[in-house]
Image: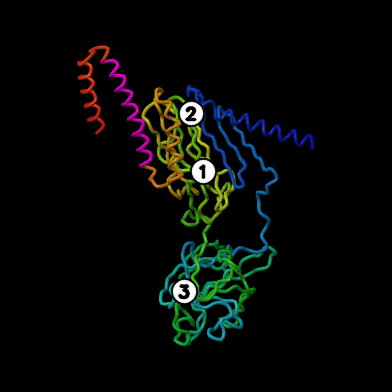
């Protein structure tokens, strides 16, 4: 126990020393000190899990787990998602065990019929794979009378215990050209288009355009021998079983596509900002929430990247260092020198997945106060915190309001300085006249 406690103290000492090193003194001058980038990631619960920094060729990657399990236990079953793209909704025109009013009984007891509208008149809605698997069937099944699945696909999925489970997609208008027998297919990848081929197009079955979907424990030849088995969907609340007469929105995301709502980001601490004097180091944190459906996984191409010209000496690509689950947040701490020139610097970033940007632009603002206005820092911070509490004003309006406040303070000080100079030079009425002319000039310049 003593050695373990000593180890914890050493780790904490390293952490404190590292943070002191990378953050530095706010008053330190940016004179040749090479600070490339700093990154701090926080995850829920709020504790530091990774710290990465690059400074003076020193690299530190410190991991503090504190007994928190970072990987979830292996699943007992495959996560199956509704068979259409995320963000879209289809209607259950017929659910499980719908006899005697409908046809889902016997072999079809655990089948569903999904439609794009309540009447089943629309065709062509994209249909996608419910999970990773291997395509085992992709063909047309229709006898001389028109009975059968029409165009249909069967995909084999592997359960964790090694047993296969099969998903069937029937009555398709067409099969996607990329679907090939005995070839792998990923979750969320195209299977075909919703249609009314086979029995679905016959008058005795209502001529209803729909997707007949079911799971099976084996591949069966022919429509009426395909025995369905019980299954649930990850993106259906409650017991996971879609009910007849309801709409359901899918969360089925293809893993290799950066599309909303599958991957989405949101800045939690807008406006992200700092207030500095020329020559100081700015320190801006970007608290970014995973507002999408998919987790942000390490080594899968997730990164924060600068848009446009990045701050001086700041690495423009900051790879993800810790998995961020949907609903969780991660924080990037940006630390870079600021030179004189202008009252505001604005740096834009966006989240990327495999070179594709997603989510809104995440902006870091740095207000640069002239030396003589250093006393305004606290007032600016108070105004921003007040804005965060109220949230009634657009960020652009807030930024402009602060810039106007700084400019007016500069002009007020300039007038005071001129007043003192003119009184010393001209004295009396002459000084007052010169001051009034100067005030008029400043007013016109401001307008």
Q: Residue 287, labelled with which disc?
A: 1
Quadrant where the C terminus sits is top left
Q: CA distance from mark 3 to mark 1?
A: 40 Å
Going from N to C along the chain, the mark reached first, 3 or 1, is 3
Q: Residue 432 appears at what percent x and percent y?
A: 22, 19
Q: CA distance from mark 3 to mark 2?
A: 58 Å
Q: Residue 107 appears at what percent x and percent y?
A: 61, 81
Q: Residue 206 appears at what percent x and percent y?
A: 45, 84
Q: Which of the two marks, 3 or 2, is nearer to us in this view?
A: 2
Q: Write the residue at 70% across / 32% down.
A: 10
Q: Residues within 10 Å of mark 1 (few under 14, many from 20)?
A: some
User: Position of 444 compared to 321: left or right?
Assistant: left
Mark 3 lies on a secondary structure that is: strand
Question: Which residue is the site of mark 2?
Answer: 281
**Residue 411 drawn in magenta:** yes
Q: Main secondary structure of the magenta part?
A: helix
Mark 2 lies on a secondary structure that is: strand
Going from N to C along the chain, the mark reached first, 3 or 2, is 3
Q: Residue 337 appears at what percent x and percent y?
A: 47, 28
222 versus 386 height, above or below: below
Q: Which of the two marks, 3 or 1, is nearer to us in this view?
A: 1
Question: Which residue is the site of mark 3?
Answer: 115
> 207 or 393, which lies in front?
393
Among the 4 quarters of the image, the one containing residue 319: top right
Q: CA distance from mark 1 to mark 2?
A: 19 Å
259 versus 271 height, above or below: below
Q: Which residues are magenta?
A: 397-422
């Amino acid at each position: 126990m003593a050695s373990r406690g000593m180890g914890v103290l050493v780790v904490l000492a390293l952490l404190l020393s590292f943070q002191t090193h990378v953050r530095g003194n706010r008053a330190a001058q940016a004179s040749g000190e090479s600070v490339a980038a700093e990154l701090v990631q926080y995850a829920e619960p709020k504790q530091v899990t990774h710290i990465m920094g690059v400074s003076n060729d020193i690299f530190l990657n410190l991991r503090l787990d504190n007994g928190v399990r970072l990987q979830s236990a292996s699943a007992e079953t495959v996560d199956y998602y509704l068979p259409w793209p995320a963000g879209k909704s289809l209607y259950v025109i017929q659910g499980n065990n719908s006899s005697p009013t409908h046809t889902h009984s016997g072999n079809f007891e655990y089948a569903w019929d999904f439609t794009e509208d309540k009447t089943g008149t629309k065709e062509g809605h994209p249909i996608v794979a419910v999970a990773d698997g291997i395509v085992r069937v992709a063909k047309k099944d229709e006898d001389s009378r028109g009975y059968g699945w029409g165009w249909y696909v069967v995909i084999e999925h592997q359960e964790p215990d090694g047993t296969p489970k099969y998903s069937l997609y029937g009555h398709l208008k067409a099969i996607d050209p990329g679907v090939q027998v005995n070839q792998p297919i990923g979750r969320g990848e195209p299977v075909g288009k919703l249609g009314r081929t086979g029995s679905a197009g016959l008058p005795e079955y209502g001529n209803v355009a729909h997707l007949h979907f079911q799971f099976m424990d084996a591949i069966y030849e022919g429509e009426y021998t395909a025995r369905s088995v019980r299954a649930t969907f990850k993106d259906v609340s409650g017991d996971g079983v879609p009910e007849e007469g309801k709409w359901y929105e899918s969360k089925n995301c293809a893993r290799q596509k950066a599309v909303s709502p599958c991957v989405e980001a949101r800045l939690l601490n807008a406006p992200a900002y700092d207030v500095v004097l020329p020559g100081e180091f700015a320190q801006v944190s970007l608290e970014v929430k995973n507002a999408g459906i998919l987790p942000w996984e390490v080594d899968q191409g997730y990164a924060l990247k600068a848009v446009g010209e990045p701050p001086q000496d700041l690495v423009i690509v900051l790879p993800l260092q810790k998995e961020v689950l949907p609903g969780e947040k991660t924080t990037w701490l940006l630390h870079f020198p600021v030179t004189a020139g202008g009252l505001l610097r604005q740096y834009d970033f966006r989240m990327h997945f495999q070179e594709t940007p997603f989510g809104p632009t995440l902006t870091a603002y740095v207000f640069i106060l002239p030396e003589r206005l250093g006393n305004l820092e606290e007032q600016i911070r108070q105004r921003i915190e007040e804005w965060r509490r109220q949230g009634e004003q657009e960020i652009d309006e807030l930024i402009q309001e602060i810039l106007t406040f700084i400019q007016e303070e500069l002009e007020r000080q300039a007038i005071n300085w001129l007043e003192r100079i003119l009184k010393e030079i001209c004295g009396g009425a002459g000084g007052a006249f010169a001051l009034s002319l100067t005030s008029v000039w400043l007013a016109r310049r401001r307008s």
